[in-house]
Amino acid sequence: MSQSLARALSILIDLGEREQSLDDLAERLGVHKTTVLRLLRTLESERFVFRDDAHRYHLGSRLFALSSLALEQREVRNIASPHLAELNQRTGQTVHLAVYEAGEVIYVDKYDSRHPVRMYSRIGLRAPLNCAAVSKVLLADMPPAKRRGVVDGIDFVRFTDQTITDAPTLLAELDRVADQGYAVDQAEHESFINCVGAPVRDASGRVAAAVSVSVPTVVLSYEQVLELLPDLLSTAAAISRDCGYGGTAPPRSTSAR
């Protein structure tokens, strides 16, 4: 990757976190302001960034258009959308769809809870690999060698007292998820949120995405969240059928090779 392209991408990533001044960006990149200004002018001319009246830079409208197109091109998201909306309507809780991409689990769709207390998440945000229910579902379907490689590369951040913080425990948890066909996040990422996740399979039987329901503890207890599993599993099964899944997942012995 060329140095200019790498710097331009770094600028966009930084602006995705918050608006910034020219000085801020130059300091973050560790280069002279004239270098950053040249890149910003190019990005601004193509509407990837814009500058406000206070001379602070923001992400521009071209990026929003591209993000919409990227989401539209995700077939599983389009297929899942009406089913997710129905699950959200039926349960009244936050519903997510996530995929594994380039070593990360990314939320690609979300339907918000009707309750005032909600989970912090958004489309495009990364889910933690060591504790999110959707991450467990997606990692559990991987062949063991790949799964182990991913787990070995995890930075085991402790988010709550319940967070899994070592590879052996997570690998054992992923075995359970693969066997039972769903995953739980019992206050592992956020101390006031419980979550259940289930796999969406494609025509080959592999897990293409994960769907989840997340509920604040002030709304439902963990045991009550588990009572939502039948609704979640039926939704995941309906999406899987629409993705061409015929009902037989690849045997785990095949995955192990």
Image (cartoon, rainbow, N blue to C red):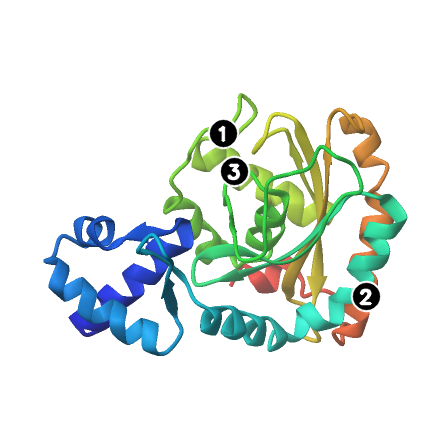
Q: How far apart, in angstroms, are the residues tagged by discs 2 and 1?
A: 32 Å
Along the horizontal axis of the image, is 242 left or right of 176?
right
Q: Residue at horizontal 17%, vertical 48%?
A: 27
Of the two numbered discs 2 and 1 on the same chain, state the one appearing first in sequence. 2
What SS does tag 1 mark? loop
x and y percent of residue 75 in the render? 66, 75
- Tell me, yes or no, if residue 246 can be seen here: no
Categorize mark 3 by other alpha carbons within 10 Å: few (<14), some (14-19), many (20+): many
Q: Which mark lies nearer to you, 3 or 1?
A: 1
Q: Amino acid at mark 2?
A: Pro
- The front one of 130 and 92 is 92
Asked if the residue at tag 3 contacts the one at tag 2, i.e. Cβ–Cβ closer than 8 Å, the answer is no
Which residue lies under the disc numbered 1? 159
Q: Where 142 sits versus 188, above or below?
A: below
Of the two numbered discs 2 and 3 on the same chain, state the one appearing first in sequence. 2
Q: Quadrant of residue 11?
A: bottom left
Which residue lies under the disc numbered 3? 170
Q: Quadrant of residue 38?
A: bottom left
x and y percent of residue 60 in the render? 43, 67
Which residue lies under the disc numbered 2? 82
Q: Residue at horizontal 28%, vertical 60%?
A: 10
- The front one of 120 and 99 is 120
Along the horizontal axis of the image, is 37 left or right of 61?
left
Q: Amino acid at mark 1?
A: Phe
x and y percent of residue 255 in the render? 57, 62
Q: How far apart, in angstroms, are the residues tagged by discs 3 and 1?
A: 15 Å
What SS does tag 3 mark? helix
Q: Where 59 sits versus 182, above or below?
A: below
x and y percent of residue 74 in the render? 61, 73
Q: Residue at horizontal 74%, vertical 72%?
A: 79
Q: Which residue is situated farthest in the left direction here?
A: 32
